[in-house]
Amino acid sequence: MKKSEIQQNLQQIINNIDEENFIYNFLLAFGLSKTTITRLKKGDYNLSNKEGELFYKSKIFFKIEETGNLLNKIDELSKSDKVLKHRPRFIFLTDFKTIIATDTKLKTNKDFSFSELPKYIDFFLPLSGAEIYRVSTDNKADREAAYKLGELYEILVTDNQDWIAEGSHQLNIFLSRLLFCFFAEDTGIFNQKSIFIETLVNNTKEDGSDIDKFLNLLFKKLNSETNDFPDYLQKFPYVNGGLFKDSIKSPKFTKKSRNILVSSGELDWSEINPDIFGSMIQAVADPIERSDLGMHYTSVPNILKLIRPLFLDELEEEFEKNFDNYNGLRKLINRISKIKFFDPACGSGNFLIITYKEIRAFEIKIIKRLIDLIPQGQTIPIYFTSIQLSQFYGIEIKDFAHEMAILSLWLAEHQMNQVFETELLDYGQVKPILPLKQAGNIICGNATRINWEIVCSKSGADEIYIIGNPPYYGARKQDNNQKEDIEFNFGKGKGSNNLDYISIWFYKGSKYIEGINASLAFVSTNSICQGEQVSLLWPKIFKINVEISFAYYSYKWTNNAKGNAGVTVVIIGLTNKTSKQKYLYLGNIKREAKNINAYLLDYKDIYVVSRLKPLSRLPEMNFGNMANDGGYLFLTSEEREDLIKQNPETLKYIKKLYGSLEFIRGLDKYCLWIEDKDLDYASSINFIKNRIKGTQNSRLQSKRKATNKLAAISHKFAEIRHQNSEAIFIPSVSSEKRNYIPLGFLNKDDIIVAPNLAIYDAQPWLFGVLHSKMHMIWVDAIGGKLETRYRYSAKLCYNTFPFPNISEKQKEIINQYVFAILDERAKYQDKTIAWMYNPETMPLNLKKVHQELDEAIERIYRLAPFNSDAERLEYLFKLYEEMIKKDTLFAKEKKVKKKKIQ
């Protein structure tokens, strides 16, 4: 159930207090079934036989308590073995003036007046199968370092054009070495704080002229085990690991760039997250990405949204289960030391590094508990980490990002080693990080072509988690190489060329995990769960015998960088079919689900396929008129007034024009609408003549031959679908914040422009059907999205919409509600449609008549009222399936009859 529905239910309980049935009505409000409530009333599910008490195992202990004794009683119950034995999520006491409640899992308490109950919906939300889900925040130091590095990069590039011309490889190596030095001197890798910057400042000129020579020599020292270097470099250790192996030439510095280098080094690099390193350098080192500095790393909270439900939450549960079991905890450490983590589009390593850090932190937590379980007097052993970088696998197509992923894993290991020793005091030891050793199994290559088993081998004994944020690229944004990658994986089958690029990762990942102890989760644009992508991709995936184990509904994938990158995404987890509980996440709300289908709905697997004709007996919906005129046939209000003022007879050549902005925001716009028979006269008017000429030139300059041909009719729109009748206007895109897509009922002279849609010669009852909650729910679930906004499609939203055949009497009833809506709108002629349909400003009477229309439409589907949007959608899906079967059967019979006639 939606929170708004629960809140309304709770408000009704408060408004009509029934003390005897309060707890039953309360549980009903959170979506518990009527069957369950009946059995609670009979006592079948009630563990308490005392009057005024209800004890529903694992859910709630409820008691009516005397005023003045509430606090003492809840404290007593919270410590009662008898109560805690059955692990109720909530202990709930009330005297119907005050409510005191405890969440036993989160160990939080609430104390509020009885009338305030609807305000505390979030606290009790787990009763509905949902959870509040929280993650940590970003680190400011990461961003500051990224911008400082960008400043240094820009001046080095400007001052070293010849150096840059030699190729990007040495630039990439130089930047990675510089970053390592910054980090190494602040985190103890170099064994002396600030050794890099202090040595540089004390042994180079202020004008920066010898910085390059200093760095060239230092890099050689870091790759050497000998001591034949100047005294000021003797304190630097041997690093190895390949980082300083290749000989490169450092760039020339000036006084300004030297100052920036020094100030960069003065930042506290010990606070930097290694997971950010590669991404932020990539942003400054890649000419294509440089303008988006700071936008190319994935924030820690966003990564946790994926890896927590994929494996961390389950590991935490195992920890809690074995909290007092020494051997069980040892087995858990052994388990996590063998898990493989694989990112087949790892970029600079964000996901792998955050995963590494989380697993290391989890290991520390287990070891601390093991120490607590050792009997007093016994010797506590020294613990070493069991987590190895060799458990981490990745594929990355860009050489520089691949190198940075390896470097960042080294740095993450050092950082976590420090945490390990600090947290475990005298009982935790780590091996020295230097000389550097192999960091993970990260290869450079094209993940769409490589056999993933070569990179990360698998066997029946393995536990593997595939993670990441693969490249998106819709079908129309793919280059030729990416198109070939799609064909390589999916062949030339129908619709394959329309698949999003990320489909490859879901498909290959599903085949990889099939039949083994493995799961995957990827971040993706929400497009793969909307529109035509659903029927193109998901049947292929579910055929592999996997299922969606958890999913996040659409949300903005943002970070705290400048510019704040914000693509709209979903997170989808896949696993082999299992009876384990599945979960859907909406914001910070976690909800149980029986089955998650490709639309990310708790419903059986179903695919709604776009159609050329309506499934229901509804009139055809048309695309709007396409001008393709370079803007010359359009008129502003001022241009219209001036033209009419100078040439009053031109009024008949001007029509009002409606796009979504004009209709929703109340903007006035007009167009020239000239019939062939009026062309000669219209062209005699200079203003119109010039506009026609402008349109002609615009079309002739096009690279498309079809557009060039349209220059012959430059007095008209390129594509005309207008009919001389009243029309329903449907905007192609509308805000998801509205409860209804704002529709218009336009007169016969109004021109509707593409990409908006129109139904001509439309009856009022159809306006009512499309303006109903039932249709809105269908569009929300089935239609595509532009970011999170509704994107309306005739083929997918309208032609597939299941609506029963209705009588003339039913049409007349709907008409009355439509007229009432139009009458209410007419009362606010000085307001925009956007204002009228903004949930915060929508007039109460307009809202009321819409609700009455909703009820009337729903009664056409069934007489019993719907209890939730989920129930409405389930009904629509069932009706869709029935109508599709009938439609398919009818088409087959028609085909057979046609053959017989022939």
Image: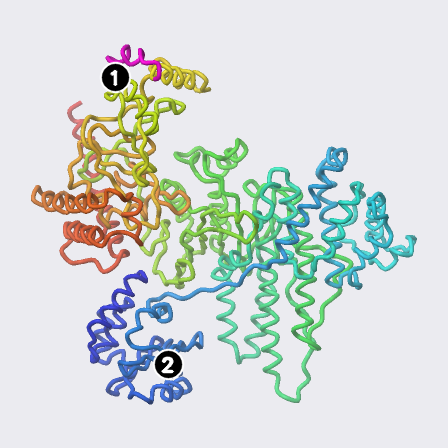
For marks 2 and 1, give the one nearer the viewer: 1
Q: Amino acid at mark 2?
A: His
| Residue 679 lies within the magenta run | yes
- When the figure is inspected, residue 264 is found, relative to residue 87, above or below; the finding is above
> For this rendering, which residue is in front, 187 or 741?
741
Disc 2/disc 1 C-alpha distance (Å): 80 Å
> For this rendering, which residue is in front, 264 or 122?
264
| Residue at numbered disc 2 | 86
Left or right relative to 474: residue 431: right
> For this rendering, which residue is in front, 599 or 444?
599
Nearer the N terminus, badge 2 or badge 1? 2
Q: Quadrant of the C terminus?
A: top left
Q: Secondary structure at mark 2?
A: loop
Tell me residue 226's x, y (percent): 89, 55
User: What secondary structure is the magenta-colored segment mainly?
Assistant: helix
- When the figure is inspected, residue 568 is found, relative to residue 85, above or below; the finding is above
Q: In which image quadrant can residue 128 be found? A: bottom left
Tell me residue 268's x, y (percent): 70, 60
Tell me residue 729's x, y (percent): 25, 36
Res 333 label? none
Extreme-left residue of the structure: 809
| Residue ID at (73%, 45%) | 173
| Residue at numbered disc 1 | 675
| Residue 134 lies within the magenta run | no
Q: Secondary structure at mark 1?
A: loop
Q: Are marks 2 and 1 in contact (CB under 8 Å)?
A: no
Left or right relative to 732: residue 371: right
**Within-10-Å neighbours for mark 2: few <14, some 14–19, many 20+:** some
| Residue extent of the magenta highlight | 675-687
Extreme-front residue of the structure: 645
